[in-house]
Amino acid sequence: QIRFSGFTWEPVIADFRFSPKEINASITEADLCGIQTPGTLSIKPGTMQINLNPVGKSIKLETAFPCFGVKRGLIHGDADVNGIISAEGPFNALRQSIEGNYKLYATDGRIYRFGGLAKVFALLNITEIFRGKLPDLVEEGFAYTSIEAAGQFEGHKIIINSVVIDGASMEIVFQGEIDHKRNTLDLTLLVAPLKTVDFIIKQTPLVNDILGGTLVSIPFNIRGDLWNPKVTALPPSAVGAGLFGIMKNILKLPVTIIQPLIPKAENDTPN
């Protein structure tokens, strides 16, 4: 068993080499929350260097996420993960030097009780863009066919290059960062409510003329406390080309970003 920075690897199989001023280990097996993390470890007086290659196949998100400190019951589904993690520095500051990257691919699951997503759904309800029953994140959850995520680790921050959520009723893409030291997040989302596209185009002549048969997506910002963030509808100009390109690629059709009319009191949701 190895404990480091609040996490526990168990069981661990490694080959150790000892010298008067250094301990080196080649880790062949190490289970961290259901993810294998082979790699190397070097310990010198006052400092440590660690290099890991996390690999997980069909891990259960409902058990893996709580193991990493995420609230229990947030998400269900199976996922494959892989990445690279390295850190070097004094023992008491090693976490601040973490660098690396990650990829995750999850299938056939549900997202529950994520405050930011719930507030996005609430704003969609106000606009009446999403005509029909939005999922209850507490009771039934938001069903997804797949989630693809990729990004980097930078000290206490998780940088999100892209997350693509393929849901039965809508597509969601976002970018941003999560700061675990401050327990904050800052995300920019594009939501494409697929079941409402025909209604918007056919029933609203002005929109029909403007869109010319393209699909629509609505931008939002989620910022603030990790578990109770503030959600705001954004103007199309606030969406970067990268995020817009991701949405176009997954929908395989022309996409237009629109800003729905939301009462100010509702658009600026409280923390």
Image (cartoon, rainbow, N blue to C red):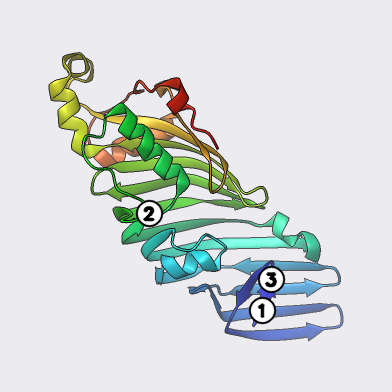
Marks 2 and 1: in contact by CB < 8 Å?
Answer: no
Mark 3 sits on what residue? Answer: 4
Mark 1 sits on what residue? Answer: 2
Question: Which residue appears farthest toward the left when viewing the image?
Answer: 202
Kindly report which numbered mark, 3 or 2, lies closer to the viewer in this rendering: 2
Q: Distance of mark 1 from mark 2, alpha carbons?
A: 36 Å
Going from N to C along the chain, the mark reached first, 1 or 2, is: 1
Mark 2 sits on what residue? Answer: 138
Q: In the picture, residue 78 is in which quadrant?
A: bottom left
Dot 1 amino acid type: Ile
Q: Secondary structure at mark 3?
A: strand
- Does residue 213 show up? no
Residue drawn 64% across and 62% down? 86
Near-viewer residue (167 or 14): 167
Marks 1 and 3: in contact by CB < 8 Å?
Answer: yes
* Residue 220, horizontal then vertical, whole percent: 43, 32
Q: From the image, which quarter does the N terminus lie in?
A: bottom right
Near-viewer residue (267 or 148): 267
Q: Is residue 77 above or below residue 38?
A: above
Q: Secondary structure at mark 2?
A: loop
* Residue 92, horizontal then vertical, whole percent: 80, 63
Q: Distance of mark 3 from mark 1, alpha carbons?
A: 7 Å
Dot 2 amino acid type: Val
Marks 2 and 3: in contact by CB < 8 Å?
Answer: no
